[in-house]
Structures are given as C-alpha cells and as structure tokens.
Image (spheres, rainbow, N blue to C red):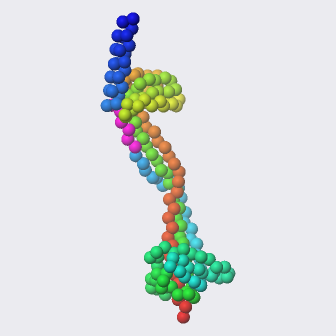
Amino acid sequence: MRDFSRTWRVLTIAAAAVSLAAVVAAQTTQTKETVPTGKVTTTTVQVKGEVVATGTNWLIAKDPTGYYKLYNVEPGRKAIIDGAPQTLDQIKVGTMLTSTATTTETPVITRTTTITKGTVFWAAPKSIIVTVEGGQNKQYAVPDGFKFDVEGKKLTAMELRPGMKVTGTKIVEEPTAVITQDVVVTGTAPK
C-alpha cells in the first residue's frame, strides 16, 4: 500500500510541474480590422416644407401636399436661410425649407484574428486539448486536413505530443455596413 501512495504523489507533482510550465509558455493575441468588401452606394432624399410652428427643439412643417410633419432639431443645429446660418430660434414661421439627406453605405467585413500559443496537453485525430494562458486547458475541434505550426513545422493532430508548443490562428469575419448621413437644410425666409 505504501508504494501506491508514493507513486500517486509523484504523478501529482509531475502533473503540477507540467501545468506550471505550460502557463509560462502560453499566450494569446488578438487583432481587429475593418475591410471594405463591395460597392459603395449613395442615395439622396430631399424633403421640402413650410415652417408653421417652432419650439425649443422642434419644428412643424407643411409639405407641398398639405401633410404636416414634426421634426426634432438637435441643439445648436443650423440651417442656411437666405445664405446665412440660423439656429432654430431664429427661423420664422413661413420660412420655406429644403432638407437634403445624402446617405452613404459601405459594405465592410470586421475581421478578428486571434493567435493562441500554448502547450499540447492531449491530442487525437479530431480534437486536441491545449494548455493556454492562465493555465486553463481548452479543447479544440480539428478540421480534416488541418496542420498545426510547431516550431516552424506543419504537423497533423496525430503528430502532436504532450508538451509540444503550438500556435493556432482563428479568423472570424462578420459582414456589416458603415452608414453615414449628411443632412443639409437650406431655405428662404418669408418676405
């Protein structure tokens, strides 16, 4: 019984030493980039109306068809009336406004590249366990034909051995669009 106890302690100490060595060797880095991916589209919409009422941060305008619309106005926003910039409190009832909104949409991909360095804890044909930063063991599925970078050599999962230092790269791409809008408001004051 005594020999079994001693063997168990030696195995426990050896496992702790391997885990500690892996913590020192493992690290992860991550980079993000946004890359344009397609045709940029631009649309322009124009809205016209006559100011019928104003408040501290709003105005009501009547469009050419007789429809009334409420517009919220950002503090400090200016319109070019008869060639001069004016704030909302300077705009008079009866002013004819034209709002021109130009929207530009650029399709992009946000690409996140994560490079993980670690130490092989266990390996099989379809799965490996790597000890990464912080001493955590992480299990990863291995796609068919995937090769690992081990000290400049490309190895399959079956060629990996516990204690080998590996580097893995994961790239995640998320398609999205960057949308910008430029709104210019011009007008003529009532005479």
The quadrant of the rendering that contains the N terminus is top left
Q: Is residue 52 left or right of residue 110?
A: right
**Vertical relation: 15 (above or below) 40:** above
Q: Is residue 179 above or below residue 10?
A: below
Residue 24 in magenta?
no
Q: Going 42% across and 41% down the picture, which residue do you hit?
A: 114
Q: Position of residue 98 (x, y in %)?
A: 56, 80
Q: What x and y, as percent, mark residue 151?
A: 35, 29
In the image, 30: left or right of 92? left
Residue 126 left/right relative to 20: right
Q: Where residue 11 sits: x, y (%)? A: 37, 15
Query: Taking 112 as reference, is 177 above or below it?
Result: below
Q: Nearer the viewer, residue 136 or 102?
A: 136
Question: Which sits in the foreground, 86 or 123?
Answer: 86
Q: Identify which residue is drawn at 42% across, 34% down.
A: 168
Where does the magenta region start and end? 25-30
Residue in the picture at 60% in, 81% down: 61
